[in-house]
Image (cartoon, rainbow, N blue to C red):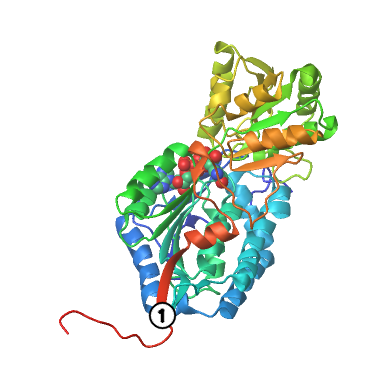
Amino acid sequence: MSFFDNPIDPPKLTNGWINNETNHGSGIEIPIFYPATGQQVSVLVEDTGDDVDKAVMSARQTFDKSNWSKLSTEKRIEILEDCRQIILDNADELARLECLATGLILREIKGFHIQRAAYNFRFFAQYISQAHGERFDNTEGYLTLVNREPAGVVGLIAPWNAPLALATMKIAAAIAFGNCAVLKPSEQTPFSLSKLVSLLKDILPPGVLNLINGRGSVTGSQLVAHPGIDRISFTGGTVTGRQVMMEAGKQLTPCTMELGGKSANIIFASADYERALDGALIGIYSNNGQQCLAGSRILVEDRIFDKFVNSFIERTKNITVGDPLKNETEIGPIASKQHMERILSFANTAEKDGDEILVGGKKASDHKNGYFIEPTAVLAKSNNSKTCQEEIFGPFASFLSFKSEEEAINLANDTEFGLVSYVWSDHMPTIMKVSNAMRSGVVWINTPMMRELRAPFGGFGNSGVGREGGYSCEQFYTEEKTVSIPKSPLTLKGFGR
Ligand code: NAD
């Protein structure tokens, strides 16, 4: 069966969720399209002013007035495990809704995104079972305790490229540390998260998790500006992140910013050739090429450059682009028409800028109405090319060659971003030297995209502020409180005795 012949029944209207009840927004209607066919499949009702206020106040009320933030760790672990289970029990429907809005490949959604979404809840259940405070006993006569208390009401803003996997990290962390949340999915991809919140309402008390829909410039910015918000966790583009942080700064609301990237995939002649080739292809073409951690600048040592690029082109020509429902599909559609046109505009200007298109660069012609493009690679004129400096966020790689470790390091770090780097070599001194020199939050050696959730994930430079991960989330979603207690009754010499 294929969406091309038999589309899934999408929700006719996608509403928000406030206080565990559906909320019919008061704003405009936004059409939602299935990227594989370009057909409009649903309508999203935007939440504005009063809706946003109602969602924040519902979370505020639950946080301030109920026992939610004071639940025992045992109870919270049970709740998190129930959230995991309900995702697994509804995996098929969630996966199809995710596919319908994003165009991600159903096989990958089921194999990775759903599993990650479920695991995020288990991960934080396990994490809080080990979490503990600090105790200092070295100031004479005093015992000092450091408690971590829930931060309060958190605003969670998610992008469209992997809604379930990314937003559940935020939701699970917020809940695990006793917060209440207002989630705003991307206005392009609301289905799976709306369904998830409708499922979680059977587990979570009213007000703990609310969902509002709408454009970032309207619903998103109203959420950030709301005085009832204690934290903003944002994943999205760098330009938007800057705006969100400026708005949040007016109220000194702490933020984490998981932003864009233009990551270097550095391939040395000393690497296992086939493994590095696979790694380079996975690095740029996974998730339909739309991922922050894409290895979009492929830097190859000059001794193997021509051979490597030719192998890459050959493999790229073999990629099956098409129906995201089919098992054999390797790259599905781009998530929106506007984004497809933006990606293609890089191919149009690349040649003018002196880059050479090696493969792709056009709309995939046999899928007329869907947002399909040919996987693309260019030989960049230099690292100053637009294709090397701007985040394209699609199946679009730029190749550059280097002669020495120093040159590879300089090229890799010559970017405003610093999210991840990939290094491929079997020579330990090279691995150590280059990985230590990377100005990025994560370095992957001889592997693509390994994520250990206990470890921090986030970027240097314009790729972000703060980190996500076990301890990083604990710090972000809690407030620290220091309590000092005299060990025996004190005799105080107060004023005016
Ligand atoms: P985006 O910045 O356009 O939107 C992200 C979210 O922010 C959406 O929900 C949007 O509605 C909202 N938003 C937009 N303007 C806002 C405003 N003024 N105030 C509040 N909210 C606002 O990003 P996108 O196009 O949805 O996602 C792609 C970007 O996300 C890429 O740059 C990608 O690299 C980045 N990303 C980063 C990570 C990471 O972990 N670092 C992960 C995934 C995606």
Percent across and percent down for residue 442 are: 63, 43
* Amino acid type, mark 1: Ile
Judge left or right: residue 350 versus residue 223: right
Judge left or right: residue 485 versus residue 227: right
Percent across and percent down for residue 416 are: 50, 31
Which residue ends up furthest to the bottom in the rendered image?
A: 489
Residue 200 in sight? yes
Residue 331 in sight? no
Q: Quadrant of the C terminus?
A: bottom left
Which residue ends up furthest to the left in the rendered image?
A: 496
Residue 316 or residue 175, whichever sits in front: 175
* Number of other residues with Cα within 10 Å of mark 1, as a class: few under 14, some 14 to 19, many 20 or more: few
Judge left or right: residue 344 versus residue 304: left
Percent across and percent down for residue 125 are: 62, 70
Percent across and percent down for residue 238 are: 47, 38
Q: Secondary structure at mark 1?
A: strand
Residue 272 or residue 96, whichever sits in front: 272
For residue 440, above or below residue 484: above
Ligand 1 contact, mark 1 (Cβ < 8 Å) = no
Q: Quadrant of residue 331?
A: top right
For residue 265, above or below residue 496: above
Give me the residue at 75% from left, 40% from top.
Answer: 329
Q: Quadrant of residue 289?
A: top right
Give me the residue at 59% from left, 55% from top.
Answer: 164
Circle 1 residue? 485
